[in-house]
Amino acid sequence: MNTAMMSSRISRLWRVQILLGLAAVLVFAVQPAQPQAAPGGSPSQSQLTLQVRVPLVLEDVVVLDNKNQPVHNLKAADFAITDEGKPVVPQSFDEHAAPTPAQQAAMQAAAPKPPALGVNVFTNYTPTPPNSPLNILLLDALNTPITDQVTVRQQMLKYLGAQPAGARIAIFGLGSRLYLLQGFTSDPAVLKAAINSKGAHVQASALLDHPVDAGSGNGLYDDGIDGGIDNSGLLGMGRTFLEFLQTNITTQRVDRTLDAFNQLAHYLSALPGRKNLIWFSAAFPIDIAPDLSLANSDGTVTPKPGEDVDIDPNKVAAHYGEQVRQTDELLARSQVALYPVDARGLFGNHEEDASSSSYGPSAASAHCIGCSQSNGTVDAQSNTNFHQQVAAEHQTMNQMAYDTGGKAFINNNDLKAAVESAIAFGSNCYTMSYTPPSGKWDGKYHKIDVKVNHPGLHLSYRRGYYADDPALDSHGKKQAQTSAMQAAMLHGAPAPGELLLDARVIPDDGTTDKLSPGSHPDSKLMQPPYRSYTLDTLLDIHNMKMTRTDTGSYEGSLEFTVLVYNAAGEVVNTKTRSAHFNLPPGRYADLLAHGLSASQSIDVPVKGSYFLRIGMHDPASCNIGAVEIPVAALKSRQAMLAPAGQSATAPQ
């Protein structure tokens, strides 16, 4: 559907919606669906299909020239791909190119300007191209000092003030757990509101030595343990115990962070296409090196008075490389490219170029931060530990970016520019698919190598994968696959617009302790009192697949689903209705012109923060439309009846 046709149809639906008025009663004028069987009670020959599952590897490749600009218009023949050293031939090849500033301006000018829909009316129509990449901002409070969190938020607001048109962005936060601040949207005002919301407030990490002040925050290169603490007052526990305790705390941070990434990977795996995950963080090492301050120059250890004689510098060492590798694999398999951004920017006495960044793990050694000084004196060992720890943190960022086909941004005070670069970097890529050389999932690790037949170009892509059957779980048992409708109904997911719909939400004036018929609540999460909301929807049926019968009528089916999510992303209540309809030609023509009206009600707990996810699904075409509405944004029934311009109040 071209832009002009879409604008005309959407405008017509909006006019009809306005004319219907608040007093109109929209009726789901269809009958419950019945199973359709061929004569004789068995499936007809036309219903039999042969399905062959072929293993398919998806690979996104970003190609940059020597000026770090994306390279366009390459062909499949320009690439050479090997899987475990064996050449493979792409079965599909697509280029994804972000619009230029001139193209963005033209799209904005050509996009239809939607009129105000009225109080409590929402639509899933957006001029954003449906195949544009998804961008996720992850604000990491677990591994980032407060002062740097403040800087990140300030620069993100600055970025959103000049956000390119059409960029689809979601915002997640990481504290004691992973949480969604704002689902995918291309509306800068909505994103800025999320950054300024209470949920995005800065918070001190309980697992950082320095939760407020800027710095690495790990504490392993600080001299407080050796110089500022009286070991004799620690009942002989000494330096080894304190270092061991610090290692355990760091391990907790690593585990929580990787758990959050694993959750994100599973969530994003249900959404098609490339995803760019921009991670603002600090102080996240793969390795904790042995504490050399515990050993003499010859490697021997001399305990201090009152200290444990069993002192081993290696006891405090730790390596998280395997956990990180597993997370990288899960991200890459979900087509998620990671873009770590050091939230501390340029710090310490680094004398190198502040704008330097990397393409692979080998560049980490070029980013060793300089010495920290106090009153002109330098603690040599503390400085050595500082070098080791910061190098390990940057090595982690580089390695995770390298493994997933992203890019790390470190030693850069312009975080806004880092986000712009990351989104531009991830919005221009080539996506290709191929079958593994063995033709099957063998469960082994496969190394991928991609080359291009043009000199001087830089490639970023995932470097390998484990050939595990995605239909099986870790124990080799079949697992349920996420359907397109399930993906469309995920909390915060992009609102699919294959079926265009408007939804008007009318809240009841009062509350009740009884659930309406057809509800499927979570008994633990769904607690009274409740408020019932009537959902009046208007659906454009042009993209529904209708079958014309011998009598000239049109047959089709529709599924209408409503989910209630709480702030933690848990489903609290559900209602689903399925319908099959047989439309005379005149009625079908009328619905094409004016849209199909349908009504549904849903109960929501009065106490708490909730979201309504409304979805329409045409099983025949597999087309879907969905829209998500925060209950807190809804006005009362009285406000809906109030004259235009009169102040409105929330229903709760």
Image (cartoon, rainbow, N blue to C red):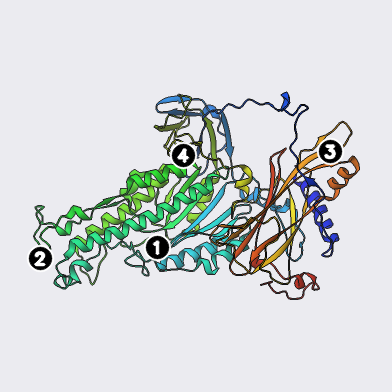
Residue type highlighted by circle 4: Asp
Please report the residue visible at 15 percent of the width from the left and 59 percent of the height from the top.
294
**Mark 4 vs mark 1: which is more N-terminal?**
1
**Mark 3 vs mark 1: which is more N-terminal?**
1
> In this orientation, which residue lies closer to the viewer: 392 or 490?
490
Q: Classify residue 581 as left or right of residue 109.
A: right
Please report the residue visible at 55 percent of the width from the left and 68 percent of the height from the top.
197
Q: CA distance from mark 4 to mark 3?
A: 42 Å
Say few, some or many: other residues with alpha carbon within 10 Å of mark 4 (under 14 / 14 to 19 / 20 or more). Answer: few
Residue type highlighted by circle 2: Lys
Secondary element at tag 4: loop
Q: Classify residue 118 as left or right of residue 282.
A: right
Classify residue 583 by image quadrant.
Answer: top right
Q: Is residue 196 visible?
A: yes
Residue 473 is marked as 4
Secondary element at tag 2: loop
Q: Which residue is mark 2?
A: 304
**Mark 2 vs mark 1: which is more N-terminal?**
1
Q: Which residue is mark 3?
A: 554
